[in-house]
Amino acid sequence: MQNNDPQNIWQNQKTEEIRVPLAYFKHKADRQRSRNLWVAVANDAVYLATLVFLGIVFVKTPNIAARLGLALLALGSLYVAHLRHKQLWPGAPASDTPPDSGITVYRRELLRWQQDQRHAWRILAPLLPGAIVFAIIAIPALVRAASADRAILINAIPFCVMLAVWLVLLPIVRRRNLKKIQQELDALGS
């Protein structure tokens, strides 16, 4: 009867040796948490600058439909900024919970970062309605202005090239980051 006792089996099982010291995982978890803090602060600054820019453009824009698009874009930016901040800023642990081991903390940070990388497009979705409404009004006006003055078109080319490069590189960088995170999780035996 003793051989089938789950507690006895669990207590007498052989454990695998961990080749990496626990301090290494604690250090990596702390580094990831610190990185998330800086990413959260940088995101907050970028969204604040975006809101200031949208506010300036809003004040200068006489078209009501373009203003509606800018307002939707600003609301989407506020919502995304809130989501990203909440996602990246580490919450305070409950006072009655015991401290986690270094491996547990590191695994949790990796899983959180993996989740963040997988759902990047879902985070950007609230920005689309405002961007579409604004683009419907702004693109024809920009094309008319560019046909009258070629300097506007020449000034817009660097922005369009940078936007295209960003759209191409974002999935590549995300895939590479997901692969690295998955390798780390596999190394932990998750």
Image: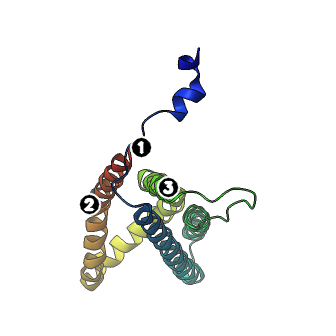
The amino acid sitting under disc 2 is: Val
Furthest-right residue in this view:
96
Q: Quadrant of the C terminus?
A: top left
Based on the displayed image, in which of its 4 quarters is residue 32 positioned? bottom left
Mark 1 or 2, nearer chain start: 2
Mark 3 or 2, nearer chain start: 3
Mark 1 in CB contact with mark 3 (< 8 angstroms): no
Circle number at residue 168: 2
Q: Is residue 106 above or below residue 162?
A: above
Give the CA distance from mark 3 to mark 2.
24 Å
Give the CA distance from mark 1 to mark 2.
31 Å
Residue at image coords 56%, 73%: 63
Circle number at residue 190: 1
Based on the displayed image, in which of its 4 quarters is residue 172 positioned? bottom left
57 left or right of 152 in image: right
Residue at image coords 38%, 49%: 188
Task: Using a 10 Å C-alpha cutoff, classify the residue at mark 2 as few (fewer than 14 neighbours), some (14 to 19) or many (20 or more).
Answer: few
The amino acid sitting under disc 1 is: Ser
Can I make out residue 171 in this image?
yes
Question: Residue 15, position in %: x, y?
Answer: 42, 41
Furthest-top residue in this view:
1
Question: Residue 44, position in %: x, y?
Answer: 55, 75
For disc 3, the marked residue is: 112
190 left or right of 57 in image: left
Give the CA distance from mark 1 to mark 3.
14 Å
Q: Is residue 151 above or below residue 127?
A: below
